[in-house]
Amino acid sequence: MKKTFYITTPIYYVNDVPHIGHAYTTIAADVLARYHRLRLGKDNVFFLTGLDEHGQKVQQAAARAGIAPQAHCDRLAPQFVNLWKRLNISNDDFVRTTEPRHTWVVQKALQQLYDKGEIYQRAYTGWYCTFDERFWTEKDVIGGLCPECKRPVEQLSETNYFFRMSKYQEWLIAYIKQHPDFLQPRSRHNEVLGFLQKPLEDLSISRPKSRLAWGIELPFDPNYVTYVWFDALVNYISVPGYLVDDDRFFKWWPADVHLIGKDILTTHSVYWSTMLKALELEPPTTIFAHGWWTVNGEKMSKSRGNVIDPNAIVDEFGVDPFRYFLLREVPFGQDGDFSRETLITRINSDLANDLGNLLHRTLTMIERYADGKVPEPGPAGNLDLDTSLRQMASELLPLLDRHVAQFEFNRALEAIWGLVQAGNQYIDKCAPWVLAKTPEDRPRLNTVLYNAAETLRFLCLTLYPFMPAAAGEVKRQLGLLLNFSKPLLAHDISWGGLLPGTEIAKGAPLFPRIEASKTQGETCVNQEEPSTLKPPEISNQAPEMTPEQISVEDFRKAVLRVGKVIAAERIPKSTKLLKLQVDIGAEQRQIVAGIGTKYTPEEMLGKRIVIVANLKPAKLMGVESQGMVLAAGDQEVTALLTTIEDVPLGSKIK
C-alpha cells in the first residue's frame, strides 16, 4: 500500500445550498480518509475540500443583495463549514478560492503556461451559458439551450485568451486507455473516450473585466480575469504547496483520488488532465465520478420542493444513520433514491436490531454475569462455533481492504454486518443465560462473553471510518483504550486483543428504534396507565366452568402470528414487565409482556413466540406495546406458546 494518501472532493460552489449530493461526496471522501489514517497514520493522509467563490453567478448574486462579492462569499461559506462539522467530516484543509495562497498559485501557473506558448489570444464568437459560465459551439447548442443545464444561451463576440487544450487530445486518449483505473467507475472511462472521439477545441480561460470583474486577474493582462474552472481546478495543487514547497507538494502529488459527481466529469477528466500535462505534472491516480440521488423516484429540484437538506435529516435521525444509509443503500457510482421510509427501515433493521442489539445484550450479560468486567475466557468448549466466529473476524480486514480500494462502500458495510449478524447468532446458539444457571458451565460462559465482547472490538475498529460517533460510543461502553488517529489497522487485528478485566460502562441503546406510523406525523392513541385502571371487582362466586361461546367469525378477528424475540429488556420499576422487540417477518414490533417473573430478558432472546398482531396499541408503564404475547397459566405465566416446527416468521396461526 502507498505510504501516503491524498483525497479531494470538488470545491463546492459557494452560491449553492448544501444538499444530499454535497453530503454524499464529502462523506464518502471522509470514509476513505479515515480508513487510510487507520492504515497509514494521521500524518500520511491529506483530505482537502472547500469552496469555489469566483465567477459571474457570485457577482450577480452579490449585486442583487447590494453587497460586495467577498462579503457575499463570507456570508455563505459558514453553511458548508458548519455542515461538515455536523457530519463529522475530518478534512485536513478547507480552501476558499478567494484566499491569497490560492490566487498566487493560479497566477503563477497561468504565467508559466503563457510563457511556454500554451496560452494565446484571439477573437471568438460563440454561444455563452451564464449558469455554467462557458462557451458552446453552434453544433453543441440545440434550440437555443445549453446542452448541460438546458438554460438559454446568448451569442457573444469578444477577444479572449485560450489554452491549447486540443494539442493534448491524442495524449489524453492514449493515457486513458493505458490507465484503466484512471476514470472510474468503468462507465465513466467509456463515456470520456466517447467524448474524445470528436475534435477537442481549445479552452477559453479568460473573461473580460468589462463583463466579469469578480475573479483572479490574469498576470499577463490586467483587463481580464481567469475562467472560473481554470481557477477552481488549481486548488488541488495550490493547497498542497505547488510552486511554494516542493517537498510538501511531492509528498502528496499526484493525488490518489479526486472524488466528484458525474456532472463535472468532463471538466476534471479533460480540462484538468490537459492542464496538468501542460504544467508537466502527473494526473491524479483516480478520478471517481459517482451517481446522483433522486427523491422518491423524482429528480431533486427547487421547483419540486424535494431537495434533501442534510441538516434536517441529522436533526431527525442523527449523523451516523445518515452516513450509513448513503453508503449502504446503493453501490457507489450508481444513482440512488432517497426515501424517509427506506432510511427508517435501515435504522431499525441494521442499526437497532443488529448492531445496537449486539452491543446492548453483550454488555448486559457481562454486567449481570461477570460483575461488569470482561471475563477471562475459559476453555474453547464448542470449537465449531468459536472457530467460525474467530475466522469471520480475522477475514474481515482483508475483505475491507479490497472493497475500499474498489470504492465498494456498500459491500464493505455488508462484510461488517456479516460479523454483526454472526455475533448475534453466536450468542443465540451458545445461550449464555442457560450457562449462567449451572456453576459447572461458568468457564464456558466466560468464554462466550469474552468472544462476544472481542467481536465488538473488531466491529469498533472497522466501523470507525463509516460511523465515527457510533464507533466512539462502542469504544466507551466496552472500555477500550483506542486512539483512532494512530495506524490501528497497520497490521491485521489479532483475536484476543481485548484485555480480560476491562471494565465496561453500559450506556443507552446505541440506535433506538424509530416507531414510524403509517402516516407521517400520526401519533398512536395513548391508553390509560396501569395505575389509573380500576381494580377488578372481587366476587365470592365460583367461576363459570363453561366460557361464553364465540363464532368462527369472532375468532378470525384475532390475527395471530409467529415471531422471534430479537431484543429484550426489563421495564424500569417493574418486576413483571419485559419490553420485547419481536420480528414477525415483514416488520418488527415492540411488545410489553408480563412475563418477567418467569423469564429473564436473556432467556427471551431468540425465542419463537406467538403474538396477537392486530391488538390496538396500548401504553404500559409509559411504554407503548404493539401486540400481545400468548402464554399459558392462570394467575402466573407458566409457559409461552410456540410452534413445534420451525416455521417462517410472520406465519399466521389459524
Image (spheres, rainbow, N blue to C red):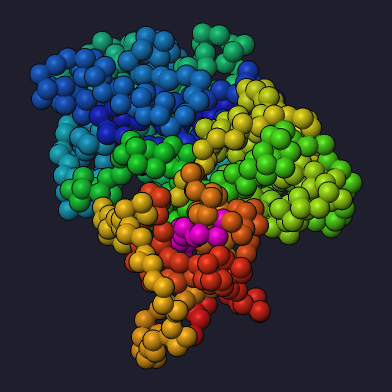
354 w.r.t. 137: above or below: below
Q: Position of residue 259 (x, y in %)?
A: 48, 36
Q: Which quadrant of the structure image shows residue 534?
A: bottom left
- Kindly tell me whether residue 167 is visible in this rendering: no
Judge left or right: residue 369 versus residue 144.
right
65 w.r.t. 300: above or below: above
Q: Nearer the viewer, residue 33 or 137?
A: 33
Q: Which quadrant of the structure image shows residue 112?
A: top left
Judge left or right: residue 564 versus residue 432.
left
Residue 588 within the magenta-colored segment of the rendering: yes
Magenta-tinted stretch: 587-596
Residue at x 34% of width, y 37% of height: 315
Q: Position of residue 137 (x, y in %)?
A: 26, 43
Q: Nearer the viewer, residue 615 or 416?
A: 615
Q: Nearer the viewer, residue 259 or 602?
A: 602
Q: Nearer the viewer, residue 226 or 394?
A: 394
Residue at x 31% of width, y 39% of height: 312
Residue at x 39% of width, y 89% of height: 549
593 w.r.t. 119: above or below: below
Name the chief secondary structure element in magenta.
Answer: strand
Q: Position of residue 71 (x, y in %)?
A: 21, 15
